[in-house]
Amino acid sequence: MIYRETGQFRTSYASDQQLFPILQDRVLVIGFLAFAFVVVPFVASDYLFRAILTPFLILSLAALGLNILVGYCGQLSLGTGGFMAVGAYAAYNLAVRIPSLNLIVVFVLAGLCATLVGALFGIPSLRIKGFYLAVTTLAAQFFLDWLFSRVGWFTNDSSSGSVAAPPLELFGHPIQGPAEKYLLVLSIVSVFALLAKNLTRGAVGRSWMATRDMDVAAEVIGIRPLYAKLTAFAVSSFYVGVAGAMWGFVYLGGWEPLAFDVNRSFELLFMVIIGGLGSILGSFLGAAFIVILPIALNRLPSALGVPLSTATVSELELMVFGGLIVFFLIAEPRGLARLWAIGKEKLRLWPFPH
Amino acid sequence: MQNRLRIKAAALALAAAGALAWAADAMAQANEIFVPVLVYRTGPYAPNGVPWADGFVDYLKLVNERDGGINGVKIAFEECETGYATDRGVECYERLKSKKPVAYSPLSTGITYALTEKAPGDHIVLITAGYGRADSVDGSVFRWNFPLLGTYWDGADILVQHVKTKGSLKGKKIALVYHDSPYGKEPIEALQALSKKEGFHLLLLPVTHPGVEQKATWLQIRQQRPDYVFLWGWGVMNSTAIKEAIAVAYPRLQMYGVWWSGAEPDVVPAEQAAKGYNALALGHSAENDRPVHKDIMKYLYEKGKGTASDRKEVGQVLYNRGMLSAILTVESIRTAMKKYGNGVMTGDQVRWGAEHLNIDAGRIKQLGVDGMMVPVHTSCMDHGGAHSARIHTWDGSSWSYTSGMYTADYKLLRPLVEESATKYAKEKGISPVDCAKEK
C-alpha cells in the first residue's frame, strides 16, 4: 500500500535510468542522508561518534571495496587487511614527508598506492580461481604484514613499530572534534558509495558480474578477463586503501601493524558475506552487524542491570554473536541485503499479499 | 518453513537495530571520583591480566571500605574488557569517558600508544606504571603520560647492569626474545645503544602474537648459544618460552625476564623445571604479608568482598603490581586534593597531582607497602618518578630476591628519551612546555 509505484510514470530515459526510480525510495534515501548530515552531528553523543559511527562508516567503506571484488567480480580475497595497511602507511608517509599536502590529496594518493599493490597481487587471478586465489591474497596479507613490521622506512624508523598520524586539518580548518571527524568520514563514504553504485550499474560493473557468473562464457562473448579482473582488484583496493588511511588517521590516530592483521581481513570478509554479496546496501548492513552488534551485546547486560563480571560478558558476547551469525546465514544465506529486498517486495503487495 | 525463518530473522534484525540505539549509562554519584579500570580477563593474556586487575580493584575497594574514600571522597570504578586489543581499548576508553574519569591505566603498551593520541585532548591522565612509552618520561612533551616506577629502557639498562656484574660483556651474545608488538619492541633502542657501549652482540628474536609458536625461535637459540636470554613476553608467551627453554636445555639461570615476564602464571606451568629463572622485580616481588595485605584480607576477603576468586592470589607478583598501580593513582588524586581541596578532582587537577607526586619512605610505610616500592618523586622533567628495580629468582616454589636495587643510568638514557620525545613533538606539532617555568 505504501510502497506502490502506481501513478509514477517515467517519461524520459534519464528518469527511468536513475538510481532510485521509485519516489518512496528517493524520499527514504535523501531523508536518511539529510538526517545523517544535518541532524546527527547535533544530536549524537561523543561516544556514539567516536566508538560507533566513525568505525562503522570506515569499515563499511572497506566492506564496499571488498564487496566489489568478491560480490560483484567473484574473486575471493583474504588480503584486505594488508591493502588497508598499504593505504594507512602510504598516507602516513605522505603526510609526514610532505607536510604541505592537502588531506584529501593524501587520502587519494594513499588509495592509488593501494591500487597499485592490489593490482599487482591481483595478477594471479588471471590463472587461478576460488580458494586458490584466496590463498594468494592471504600470502599478500602476510607479506604486507611482514613488510610494515620489518622495513623501518615505512614507520619512519620508529623504534616501537607504532606510528602516530599528524593532526588533521582541511583547508586550514583543524578537524579535531568527533562530530567533525564523523562528517569528514560520512562525506567521503557517501561519495564513494555513489561512485560504487554507478560503477556497478555501468559497463565495467556488468563485465565484473559476467566474470563472476560464468567467466568462460563472458570471455566468449568478448569481455576481456584481464581487464575485468584487474579493474575489480584496482577499484576494490582503492576503496580499501582509502578506508585504511581513514582508519589510521581519523579513527585510531596511531596504530601498530597488528591493527591490519589477518583478523581484519576475515572480519571484512564476514561483513560482506553476512551483509550480502553483490550489494552496496549489503556492505553497510554487514558492517553494522559486525562492528556495532558486539558492542551492543557487550553493553546489554549492564544496560539491563544484570550484574555480570566483564569476563562473563565478553564470553557471552562471543557466543551470542557466533550464534546470531549462524542463525542469519541459515535463515537467509544471501545476506541481510536480501532480507531487506524481500521486505520491500512484500511491502509492494501489503496489505494484500497473494 | 524457510519463509517463517526469514520473518523471524527480519524481526530479530529489527530488534537488534532497536537495541543499538541504547545508551543507558548510570552516572557516577555526585560526590564520587570515577576511576575506570581497563582489564583483560579473557584471551591469551588473561592469565596475567586477571591478577593485575584483581589487585587494582581490591585496592580501590579497600580505600572505600577502610578509609571511606580519598579524604572522604569515595571512588566509583567500572571495569571494561579490552582483551589486549587496541580497538577494544579505544572503545572502552570512549565508553567510560562519559563518567568523567580522571586517570586510565590500560595495562597494554599498544593501547597506551593509541590513547596517547586521545587523552591530551580529553584532559585525562594516563598512568602507565611499569609499561607504556619509554620516551613519555619527558613530561615537557608528554604532559599527560606518567610511566611511573620504571620504563622498558630502564629495565633493559638494569638487566645489562646486572649481567655485567657476572663478568665483562665485551664479545658476549645477548638474545632478546620479544613479543612482536610495541611492548616487545620498546627495549630494542636502549639495548642497541647499550650493545654499542658495552660491546656485546644483540640478537633480536621476535615472537608473533599470541606467542605460542616459539619452536623456531628456541632452535635458533640452541644454535647460536647466547650467553644470556632476555625475555620480553606477556601472557602465554612467557610460560611457552620457559617450557621451550627447558626443551632445548637452555639453562634457566641465564634467562632474565622483564618485570612483566616474571610472575607465577609464567613459571608455575613448568613447575620445578623453571627453577633458576630470573626476572626483574619492579621494586616488589610476591610479598603477601605486608600491612596492606592484612588490611585487604580483613576488610575485603573476610567480608566476602574480595575480587579474586582464589585468596591465594592476594600477594602474588602481578596482584601486587596491580595494587601498586592503584596506589599510585590514588596518591596522585590525594596529592591533587592537597592543592585543590577535598572534592571531586578533574583530569587537569589529577595531572598536577601526578606531576608532583612525592611518595617518600615515611609515606610508603604509612601505605603499608614497606619494602615493596622505592620512593617516587615526579616532576615535569621526569614523569617516571623512580627508575629502580632488582632481580628475583624462582626456586621452584617461590620468588626470592637475588640482587640489590639497581638504578637505570640516565646519563645514557636521557639523550635517547629526549631525542625520541622531540621527534614525536615534531611529528604531532606539539610545542614542548618549558619545565623550568612549570609550578
Image: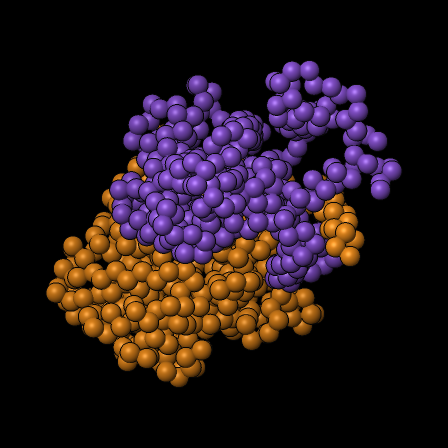
Question: As displayed, is residue B123 above or below residue B225?
Answer: above
Q: Is residue B271 left or right of residue A67?
A: left
Question: As displayed, is residue A104 above or below residue A279?
Answer: above
Q: Which chain is purple?
A: A
Residue at image point 69% right, 70% down = B304
Question: As displayed, is residue B41 above or below residue B253?
Answer: above
Residue at image point 50% right, 34% down = A205
**Of B142 and A247, which appears nearest the observer?**
A247
Q: Is residue B79 visible?
A: yes
Q: Quadrant of residue A237?
A: top left
Residue at image point 84% right, 31% down = A1
Where is residue B125 drawn, in percent x and y?
50, 43
**Of A327 and A123, which appears nearest the observer?**
A123
* Residue at far front of view: A220
Colour that chain B carries in the picture: orange
Residue at image point 44% right, 28% down = A168
Where is residue B331 drawn, in percent x and y?
52, 51
